[in-house]
Image: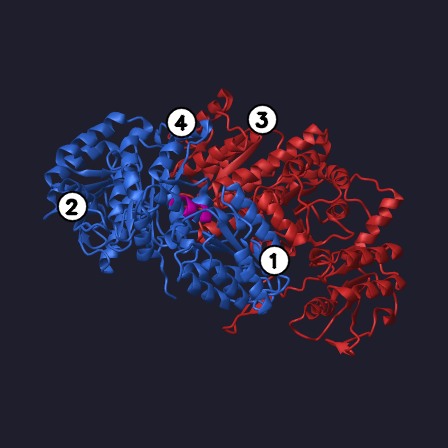
Chain colours: A red, B blue
């Protein structure tokens, strides 16, 4: 296992990471509790693997295990895990909770490396001892356990898919529709304590065309927890940013130690629920999470360089920005718009978020005056920040103005409001803006408002060219805030070099 | 003109309202500055009217006015407004600013009632005297003026459409795409100081299938302002809720007086920008707005019963809830979910918004226990609020549980989280929930997370049946907050009867 960049791992750490690697790159998988019954989780999961294997995506060995079947979907079925011939490094368990310990004993005998326990009925419903029994057996055999009570792993590249939620669903009308899609490959890792939020996230990320490197739902986290996965992802070349849903952190010291290490290299965004007292009560009855004081979490995330999202939209919006754009080196934002009102909304939100939208210095104002004198932008344009090119904007005016703002040292990041409704604006400016932005180490995010064809086209095109787009001015401002927060964290921790390495590795798009 | 319900108008007031009516129901329209040149505002606006007239939607007389043309799009063209035969009650002016006063003088001669000045180049660029001149002429002739520097009016029913932004746009690829669509007819009025935000709103509302009763962009508001329009909308039967974008309010006393009157009958949601000091500076350079202290605005809105949205998504989300659901009589919310994590997110947001999610009383808990005993819901369901039916939810369990929550007096509103990813959930529960909700005077909003087929289907179906849907837990909670805020305002002002009248008039959907 090679580190992504820079980091050296010692041999103990390497051993630990190698174990976790079996969750994502298994050589042989046994699905214990595989079945032919179409409505069962054991069917959906086995079918995920078998389809993947037949298509040549999953390249390892695949063994269904079920005492009552001879074959499933054309694969020879084994009565017990112990009867499977050859080595097995990953097992997926979908049998009643009480049967899990005996399966685990067999797994120890087979020298299994990693195990995903999908089954529920453990600590979350009060069966603490049963869960402890499983952990003890796993420890004895050196097996890493994900779950129980989880969705497990999705990794498109190797075809590992332990999600029991089928991709499509048949409505009562007879129509088959997309229900829990799997996102395209990409650079965002999504890890989650809540399986329901995890499946919703897959749906959201797919629809918004945000690609995913690894998906992990860890449920009760009896063994592998958020810290272990974060640590693994630090060395995962495909992961560029991690999105994390948490209801609690059991081992705060471990979390902080690992988070500090990870966030100097790759940004992490968290949504931590159970913020309120009623929310904490709800979380306790959900996953048995002991939420603890929210202020302590807030402080810990800050110390660990983990960016906390305020709500779901901000969570995904920040993730998108961090996956596409370099961090900012300061908090003074330049706003470029063709729409006065939405420009003001952006300024309001920036200031609310403690970003500044300072009036430009005389130097920039002079340069904008020169653009006016050369008729490159209209005389009526406002140019003191925001730059408002007005409803008479053209593609060229946008590109020329953006170039000036990228060059200027006093602007740390740019929010572009390209409302497509203006009659003179076509789609040509998109490539122009992207081309210019790729020349600078300065972040840019954009907003276009609307939910019909041209708005969807504009946003989607910017996204594909790695300028993250947002459907509201406030969404764009919040995304920029994430780039500022991470940038300032890196500077504070003397990690400016890492910042440059990160940018060079990930962020410079050459259109 | 008949009032919507309840209110009596005196004859002065009736005269004033009748004048404003000419903006929406004109008998004869002259477009001054109509042209054949395809890229000009005067072409787009005249074409809006002529198409509408040829299709039989606009039933009045239509006159293009332009000294250089004999006919435009088959309509005889007049050299001057004064040459138009017969009466004209509405004129739309799209000529250079300096020419506007002479057009206005002709309008006085023609006894025009209402005038939309699209032209820019007045107060917003410092030409204060020119604008004052226009106002003086209008006053002399008793003409009500909308604008200048505005988009004007869109009213689908009579075909009035003074928007110079074409519905479609041709990309450089040659593809024609929807750019500034006009929404379908509905019960939401959208009024705005910013034209750019207005056009974006039309795009948003169309895409989200939110119907619009009247659209008014009032720009510099040299005469007709937000208060006049709000007052008119009180008596507009088609308008059920008003969404309002403001950068300032010039006449605070008038606004407060009218707002107080309106909000006892119909809810009003405002997004007021220029909140921050940098935002106020930007607003000043945009529309010359003097934003004033944001705290004063906050207090005034509260006093006037106007609900203030925090950002764009909340603005539209609140509007949708108020357009579809009755106000709540208290602030204790019941949450019904099939997804634990998103349930906790909802609780967090409710508590953040100062709503309560109290643990249920023994009485409800007992009733839920009975449902468990009868196997109507699963034993593993959490039932102390949130009610979490878990991933094993079925359509019937959702409907049965919702019925119990609607019946209970201690719950003032219901947030339903119907995440469609759960394998046993089909779309059947949607109609079941709607049917039950229509039996009670208690609001419900729903959330499903995801951006692919089944999520879009689920949300759209709920919306069409007037249970407003949201794509995030926080969005649903914020929408419920608006229903609580308005309900409490009505109670505080002894307007419970109005509340019932409102509900009976608008909110009871019989599926």
Sequence-earlier tag: 4 or 2 = 2
Answer whether labels 1 and 3 touch (C-beta < 8 Å): no
Depth check: B327 or A164 in front? B327
Query: Which residue, given by chain and number where applicable, does mark 2 sit on?
Result: B89
Query: Which residue, given by chain and number where applicable, does mark 4 sit on?
Result: B293
Judge depth for marks 4 and 3 and give the one in front. 4
Magenta extent: B479-486
Chain ID of residue with mark 4: B
Number of residues whose C-alpha sits closer than 10 Å to that of mark 4, classed few (under 14), some (14–19) or many (20 or more): few
Residue A380 drawn at (x, y percent): 37, 30
Q: CA distance from mark 4 to mark 3?
A: 32 Å
Q: Secondary structure at mark 3?
A: loop
Residue B315 seen in this snapshot:
yes
Depth check: B102 or A106 in front? A106
Q: CA distance from mark 1 to mark 4?
A: 47 Å
Number of residues whose C-alpha sits closer than 10 Å to that of mark 3, classed few (under 14), some (14–19) or many (20 or more): few
Determine if the magenta segment contains residue B481: yes
Residue A10 lies left or right of residue A145; in this view the side is: right
Number of residues whose C-alpha sits closer than 10 Å to that of mark 1, classed few (under 14), some (14–19) or many (20 or more): some
Q: Which mark is residue A409?
A: 3
Judge depth for marks 2 and 3 and give the one in front. 2
Query: Which residue, given by chain and number where applicable, does mark 1 sit on?
Result: B382
Q: Main secondary structure of the magenta part?
A: helix
Chain ID of residue with mark 3: A
């Amino acid at each position: 296992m090679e580190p992504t960049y820079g980091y050296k791992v010692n041999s103990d750490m390497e051993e630990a990471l190698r174990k976790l690697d079996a969750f994502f790159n298994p050589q042989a998988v046994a699905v214990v509790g595989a079945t032919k019954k179409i409505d069962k989780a054991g069917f959906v999961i086995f079918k995920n693997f078998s389809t993947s294997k037949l298509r040549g995506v999953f390249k390892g060995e695949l063994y269904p295990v079920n005492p009552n079947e001879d074959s499933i979907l054309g694969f020879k079925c084994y009565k017990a895990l112990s009867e499977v011939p050859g080595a097995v490094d990953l097992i997926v368990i979908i049998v009643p909770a009480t049967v899990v310990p005996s399966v685990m004993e067999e797994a120890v005998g087979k020298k299994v490396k990693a195990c995903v326990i999908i089954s529920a009925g453990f600590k979350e419903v009060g069966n603490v001892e049963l869960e402890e029994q499983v952990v003890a057996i796993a420890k004895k055999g050196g097996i890493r356990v994900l779950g129980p009570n989880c969705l497990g792993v999705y990794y498109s590249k190797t075809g590992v898919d332990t999600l029991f939620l089928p991709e499509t669903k048949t409505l009562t009308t007879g129509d088959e529709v997309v229900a829990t899609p799997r996102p395209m490959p990409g650079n965002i890792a999504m890890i989650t304590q809540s399986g329901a939020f995890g499946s919703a996230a897959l749906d959201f990320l797919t629809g918004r065309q945000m690609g995913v490197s690894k998906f992990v739902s860890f449920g009760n986290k009896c063994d592998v927890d958020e810290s272990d996965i974060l640590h693994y992802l630090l060395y995962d070349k495909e992961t560029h940013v991690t999105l994390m849903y948490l209801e609690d952190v059991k081992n705060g010291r471990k979390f902080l130690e690992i988070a500090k290490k990870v966030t100097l290299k790759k940004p992490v965004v968290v949504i931590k629920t159970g913020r309120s007292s009623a929310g904490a009560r709800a979380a306790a009855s959900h996953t048995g999470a002991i939420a603890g004081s929210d202020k302590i979490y807030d402080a810990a995330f800050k110390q660990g360089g983990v960016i906390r999202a305020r709500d779901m939209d901000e969570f995904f919006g920040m993730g998108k920005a961090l996956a596409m754009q370099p961090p900012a080196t300061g908090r003074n934002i330049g706003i470029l718009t063709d729409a006065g009102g939405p420009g003001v909304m952006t300024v309001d939100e920036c200031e609310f978020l403690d970003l500044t939208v300072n009036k430009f210095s005389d130097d920039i104002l002079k340069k904008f005056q020169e653009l006016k004198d050369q008729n490159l932008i209209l005389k009526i344009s406002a140019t003191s920040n925001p730059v408002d090119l007005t409803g008479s904007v053209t593609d060229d005016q946008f590109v020329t103005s953006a170039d000036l703002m990228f060059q200027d040292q006093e602007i740390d990041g740019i929010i572009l409001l390209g409302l497509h409704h203006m009659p003179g604006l076509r789609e040509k400016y998109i490539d122009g803006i992207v081309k210019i932005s790729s020349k600078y180490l300065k972040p840019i995010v954009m907003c276009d408002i609307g939910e019909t064809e041209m708005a969807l086209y504009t946003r989607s095109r910017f996204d594909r060219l790695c300028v993250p787009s947002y459907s509201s001015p406030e969404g764009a401002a919040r995304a920029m805030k994430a780039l500022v927060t991470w940038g300032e964290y890196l500077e504070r921790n003397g990690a400016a070099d890492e910042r440059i390495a990160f940018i060079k590795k990930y962020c410079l798009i050459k259109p």
